[in-house]
Image (tube, rainbow, N blue to C red):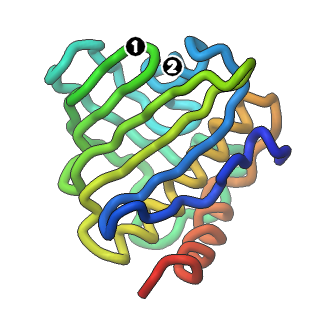
Amino acid sequence: MNELATFSAYGVLIEPATLKLERLLPGPIERVWAYLTKSDLRRLWLAAGEMPMKLDEPFELVWRNDELTNPAGERPAGFPEEQRMQSRITEIDPPRKLAISWGSTGGVSFELEPRGKDVLLTVIHRSLPDRTAILMFGAGWHMHLDILAAHATGKEPEPFWDGWLRLRAEYDRRMPA
């Protein structure tokens, strides 16, 4: 991928249980916002699910990671074909910030900041319970954001599961024990 798609590619711990990742994506900001909020666009890189654009409204996210890339690579044992999660919007400021509850692992915020013709997307996942979760979510967010960057720049993404396995090993090396 090019420099635009890999801006600060690896996630970093900004607190012991808080992971931050960034990507510089081609704008405008409304385009990137649509990839976060519109089910048909979000399903291309993360998860489907109609998202009501109202504070505290419930919605469901549906992951089908095998469908994100073709080929998807071999799904690791223990990962289902489909994963569902109930969520709620906890903060919304279109088109600059979206924060949602994230199952039992706290919350995730997405912040968008214009940078010339580009947009800096910052993802912060809070309240990760342990190192295992940090490695799993670090590799997951990293791979999902790589796929988003590929879509935004017209590139072909790496097979999802191959990338996730490679990234999980890399996060294991990078994150403190």
Kindly identify which residue carries mark 2.
Answer: 33
State the separation of the CA atoms marked 1 and 2.
Answer: 8 Å
| For residue 18, side relative to residue 140 (left or right) | left
> Secondary structure under badge 1?
loop
Residue at 50 percent across and 40 percent down: it is 122
Viewer-side label of 1, 2:
1
- Which one is nearer the viewer's eye here, 80 or 162? 162
Q: Mark 1 touching mark 2, by CB under 8 A? A: yes
Give the number of callouts. 2
Measuring from the top left, give residue 103's x and y in whole percent: 21, 48
Q: Give the amino acid at mark 1.
A: Pro
Q: Position of residue 134 (x, y in %)?
A: 39, 68
Q: Residues within 10 Å of mark 2 (few under 14, many from 20)?
A: many
Along the line of sight, which residue is nearer the eye, 161 or 82?
Answer: 161
Q: Between disc 1 and disc 2, whose residue precedes? A: 2
**Can you say whether 157 is above or below 92 in the image?**
below
Q: Position of residue 92 (x, y in %)?
A: 30, 20
Q: Quadrant of residue 63?
A: top left
Residue lying farthest to the bottom in this orientation: 177
Indicate the amino acid at tag 2. Answer: Trp
SS assignment at label 2: helix
Q: Is residue 70 above or below residue 50?
A: below
Looking at the image, residue 147 lies above or below residue 72:
above
Mark 1, residues whose alpha carbon is within 10 Å: few (<14), some, or many (≥20)?
some
- Would you identify the image quadrant in which residue 62 lies? top left
> Could you tell me residue 16's position as x and y percent?
32, 70
Residue annotated with mark 1: 94
Q: Of 44 and 144, which appears nearest the observer?
A: 144
12 left or right, relative to 164: left
Residue lying at 23% horizontally and 40% vertically, measured from the top left: 101
- Quadrant showing the C terminus: bottom left
Q: Residue at x 29, y 53 (%)?
A: 126
